[in-house]
Amino acid sequence: MQRFSQMSKDALEMENERLNREKQKAKDQGLDTQLAILEQKINLARSYLIDPATVQTACWYQVEGKNIPFYVEYLNGVMAWGNWEHSGEKAAVPLALLEKPVSRRSVK
């Protein structure tokens, strides 16, 4: 299998569709571990479809599936590096999970 970083946009979109079909099968069969792995792969594949230039650094973002904001310090490839609000620990979030810039208080 080719790496996501080496795939064309069309190939990434096809791979994303394939992974989503696999994810649905895993969900139907109750395979929770496989489901989590597929969700991570999907998020990474989606991240390669995002232009990193569209992501602001030194900015708080709402993150898909999370109720606390994430502060983006810098980007490295398809990952945004920074920290969650009220945490000094460095973390990485795939670009595909960044929804929109927010003020710290507007995330619910």
Image: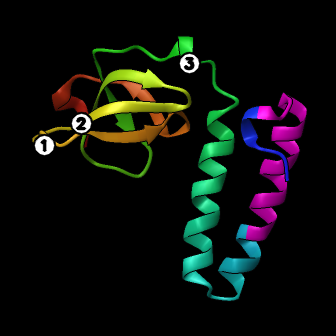
Q: Amino acid at mark 2?
A: Asn
How many neighbours does mark 3 have within 10 angstroms: few (below 14), some (14-19), or many (20 or more)? some
Image quadrant occupied by the N terminus: bottom right
Residue 87: image tag? 1
Q: Quadrant of residue 100?
A: top left
- Is residue 8 covered in magenta? yes
Q: Is residue 20 above or below residue 64?
A: below
Image quadrant occupied by the C terminus: top left
Residue 83: image tag? 2
Q: CA distance from mark 2 to mark 3?
A: 18 Å
- Give the mark nearer the N terminus: 2 vs 3: 3
Q: Is residue 54 above or below residue 30?
A: above
Q: Mark 1 and 2 residues: CB-CB less than 8 Å, in contact? A: yes
The residues colored magenta run 6-22
Q: Amino acid at mark 3?
A: Pro
Q: Amino acid at mark 1?
A: Ser
Give the x, y percent position of residue 4: 74, 41
Residue 57: image tag? none
Q: Magenta region's main secondary structure? A: helix
Residue name at image x 22 percent, y 30 percent: 106
- Is residue 100 covered in magenta? no
Residue name at image x 61 percent, y 35 percent: 47
How many neighbours does mark 2 have within 10 angstroms: few (below 14), some (14-19), or many (20 or more)? some
- Taking the image as shown, residue 5 lies to the left or right of residue 88, namely right
Asked which secondary structure carries label 3, the reply is: helix
- Taking the image as shown, residue 63 lies to the left or right of residue 34, namely left
Asked which secondary structure carries label 2, the reply is: strand
Residue under circle 3?
52
- Taking the image as shown, residue 73 lies to the left or right of residue 64, namely left
How many neighbours does mark 1 have within 10 angstroms: few (below 14), some (14-19), or many (20 or more)? few
